[in-house]
Amino acid sequence: MTMTLAVRVIPCLDVADGRVVKGVNFENLRDAGDPVELARRYYEQGADELTFLDVKATVDNRSTTYDVVRATAEQVFIPLTVGGGIRSVEDVARLQGHGADKIGLNSAAIARPALIGEIADRFGSQVLVLSLDVKRSGRTESGFVVTTHGGRTETDLDAVAWATAALELGAGELLVNSIDADGTKNGFDTELIALMHSFSTVPVIASGGAGALEHFPPAIAAGADAVLAASVFHSGELTIGDVKRELGDAGMLVR
């Protein structure tokens, strides 16, 4: 669909109480550093975008997140996507006022799908990234079910049916995170990526499972327009430049 465009490499910062955290399958979170410092490092390494996910987006934590977003936006001049705890168009306006370029919606969109349309109508589809935490399941037609609460709670939503409905409502990108692969470092779920690419009319961002350089080209080959990773970058095992070189060597266009 959009293979003529340069593929994007996106580091993800999972932020809790103003610090970057990392766990496996969203559990046993460990401190991974200062978000503003990490964001600046990734920007200097050549990241195409940055994604911030507030993993504990309770009301008391919200002001911390706004401060971190503002501090990051002042240091980093690439698109910044912020997700976690967004429940209204007012939340989106406030985040944009603090420097966010795009927002990620997950649980709030599931709870009230109309929110997708409200945000797309007011700010444009390009602002809205639908975040899907997807798990394999025998209960759904596609074989994949949507989860909430970091994969701990299964919904009754078939991943394909939900993504299709969200696209019709105005979602501008699909961030597809494989809960089964998340944090395992065994590679992206290419079957899931190919499935999402097969019907998506917007870019697909692959997330979950990156552990080695050779994991990235297959995700793009399966249909992803961008690859997102967290722990391999935070730990310094891989740099953004390493990943871009690997993709370039595989014949993929990178910035």
Image (cartoon, rainbow, N blue to C red):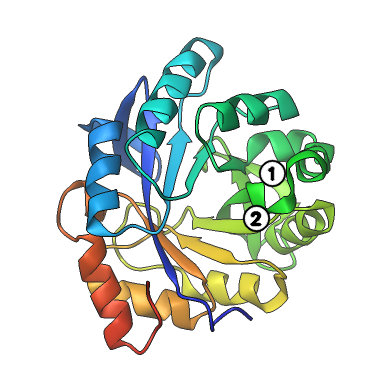
Secondary structure found at label 1: strand
Return the residue at label 1. Answer: 155
Q: Residue 229, image x and y in percent?
A: 35, 56
In terms of depth relative to the viewer, which is nearer, 220 or 138? 220
Q: Residue 21, image x and y in percent?
A: 30, 34
Q: Is residue 187 above or below residue 222?
A: above
In this picture, residue 236 sits left or right of residue 106 = left
Q: Residues within 10 Å of mark 1 (few under 14, many from 20)?
A: few
Which quarter of the rendering shows the N terminus?
A: bottom right
Which quarter of the rendering shows the C terminus?
A: bottom left
Q: Residue 2, image x and y in percent?
A: 59, 78
Residue 145, numbered label: 2
- Amino acid type assigned to the residue bearing label 2 in the image: Val
Q: Is residue 8 above or below residue 74?
A: below
In terms of depth relative to the viewer, which is nearer, 221 or 5? 5
Please say if the residues under marks 2 and 1 sit with CB atoms less than 8 Å apart.
yes
Label tally:
2
In this picture, residue 125 sits left or right of residue 249 = right
- Amino acid type assigned to the residue bearing label 1 in the image: Thr
Q: Residues within 10 Å of mark 2 (few under 14, many from 20)?
A: many
